[in-house]
Structures are given as structure tokens and as C-alpha cells.
Image (cartoon, grey):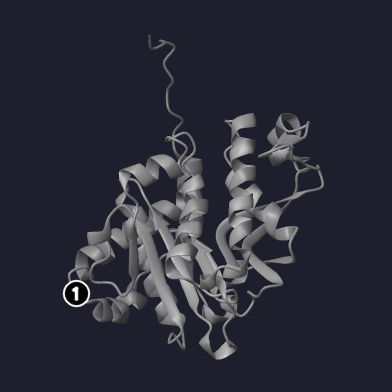
Amino acid sequence: MPIQYKERQHSQLRQVLLYVAYGDDLLYYQGVKTSILSVLHHCKNNRQLEVVVISEKPDFFANYPVTHFTITPALKLDWSLNNRYHYRIKNRALAHAIDNLHLGANDKILALDTDTYLTKDINGLFDKINVHQSLMFLDEGPLTKKQFTEYRESYQSPIKLEGDEGYQISHQDHMWGSLMVGITASKRTLVDKADQLLVALHQWAPTVRTVEQFAISQVLSNDGELIEGKNYVHHYSHKGRKYFAQTNIEAFFANYGHYTFDTQLQYYPKLRLRRTLAAFLLEKFAKLTQSPKTTSRTKAI
């Protein structure tokens, strides 16, 4: 076992919270800051917590209490398979963080998507992670479900991995959401194994978008127990939620972004990220009562 993965005593265990942001959309970067604020707002004891951001914009996080690793243009090209599959960046960033933080075998790392925010103490999530148990957001069900038809149609034969190894997908395999991935550093080799699988899956059927989350859930579920962490977080990845959250996040940082981190943390409770039921129903009613748009029969050439 390499030196950086030597086991430590329990009192020395590290807890790393990881975010990955890339691209030009400001919401991704503001989303990381928002999520960090939500974590520390709910966290009763953050003495062990280390926050790590891997992004293309190091200056954006200069006044935040984080360790930052920069995604250079060369790294981005490599990690995204020459811009063919950018979701692979999540896998490679997780490996990069474990390697460069020199984590011990029992140290824990939890990766969260940028549109995720905590509603409970994050220590509850870290408590669920150990060498025998890993964490992902949500078990979305077996591949027999209707929304996974592309897996049943695209992957009927064994998938060839490196060397002569093959991987046969079963229709009973489950898809898990990778909005969060929590593991111990002892599972570092599994991150590479998941990467091999996702690359092979992508090469076999390039239009299947979810191979990143499927690959990591496959290797983790085959190496110990895999459990859900959905009860600790909310997210705004859906269209209606995203528009509401983005409007308020932009307003929050317009008003408080120039303050120190500690002051932003004090003002965080003012930030509303979730629509009230009344607002949600009004929005639905407005859509139902909108006049249908007239459609043109003229085709664009």
C-alpha cells in the first residue's frame, strides 16, 4: 500500500468535502459557494472538515476557506476525453484530490455537485462512510425501468475493458445518482476501475449520458455496501427549481458577495433556495393558463 494510504488512528481521521466546477456558467461557481455556506451553517463541529475545490477559476474562491486545485486547459482536455464526455471530469477530479491531499486509507472524502445544498449537519453523512460502506445520492432503481431503455438496448454484449477483461451489464443492475459520492481513500483504485468502465461504456455507446454515475455505482456496490444520502440535501437541478434558486443566488452575491466569508455566512439564512408550496402552485397555474404559442410552418434552412 502506498505511503499516502497508510492507516491512521480514528482521532486523526480527515474529512474532505470536494466540489468540482468547470465551464463558463457563473452559477456553477456561485453554487459551490452557496453549498459551502449551507454546509457550515448546519455543521455543529467543523474542526475536522476540509473543503476542497477543483475548478478553472482559482481567483473566484480566494476569500473562501478552501484548498483549491486548478483545472488547466490541458487537464480539462485529458479528463473530458478531448471534450467528448465532460462528466468524466467528476471521476478524474475525485482521483486527483485523493492523490494530492495524501489521504490515509480510512480518511473520508465526499464529493457534492455544485447545485446541492445541505439541510442537516454534514457530519451525519461522513458518519455513514467507512471502509465497508460507501455513499451516493439516490438509488434510482434497476435498469428494467423505462427511463433506462438505452442501457438495455446499447449494452447487450459484454463490454471490453483493458486487457482481455469483459464486463457484462445485467438488467437487474441499479442506477444511482452521483449528485454525491462518499468513499474512504482506501477505495482509490476503485475510482480508476470506474473510470475504465465509463470510458469503455462511452466508447461503446457515445450518446448515453449517464455512464459516469452508472460506472462508479457499479464498482462501489460490488465492493461493500452502497447507501443513500438523499435525506441530508436538497438540489436545484430541475428547470423550475434552478430558475428560482439562480435568481436568489445571484441577488445574494450581488448584495453580500463583497463581504468577508464570515459575514456571508451570517447572512446565509436570508437566502431562499426552495420555492414555497404556494409559489410552486402559482407557477404551475400560470403555465396552465398561458396561451399556446403559435407555431410557424416555415422550416429553417
SS label for mark 1: loop
Residue 181, visible in the rendered structure: yes
Q: Give the residue number, with chain letter if any, for mark 1.
A: 259
Please say if 278 is above or below 77.
below
Q: Where's residue 23, x and y in %?
A: 34, 46
Quarter holding the N terminus is bottom right
Please say if 150 is above or below 58.
above
Q: Where's residue 18, x and y in %?
A: 45, 65
Of residues 268 and 51, the one nearer the viewer is 51
Q: Where's residue 155, x and y in %?
A: 73, 33
For the point 64% across and 30% down, which residue is it? 204
For the point 50% across and 72% down, which residue is it? 103
Q: Where's residue 245, x and y in %?
A: 39, 59
Of residues 164 and 22, the one nearer the viewer is 164
Disc 1: CA contacts within 10 A as few (<14), some (14-19) or many (>=20): few
For the point 44% across and 12% down, which residue is it? 297
Of residues 13 and 58, the one nearer the viewer is 13
Please say if 300 is above or below 7.
above
**Amino acid under label 1?**
Tyr
For the point 24% across and 80% down, which residue is it? 263
Residue 151 position by quadrant = top right
Instruction: Please give left or right for residue 78 compared with residue 228 in the image.
Output: left
Instruction: Please give left or right for residue 66 compared with residue 87 in the image.
Output: left
Quarter holding the C terminus is top left
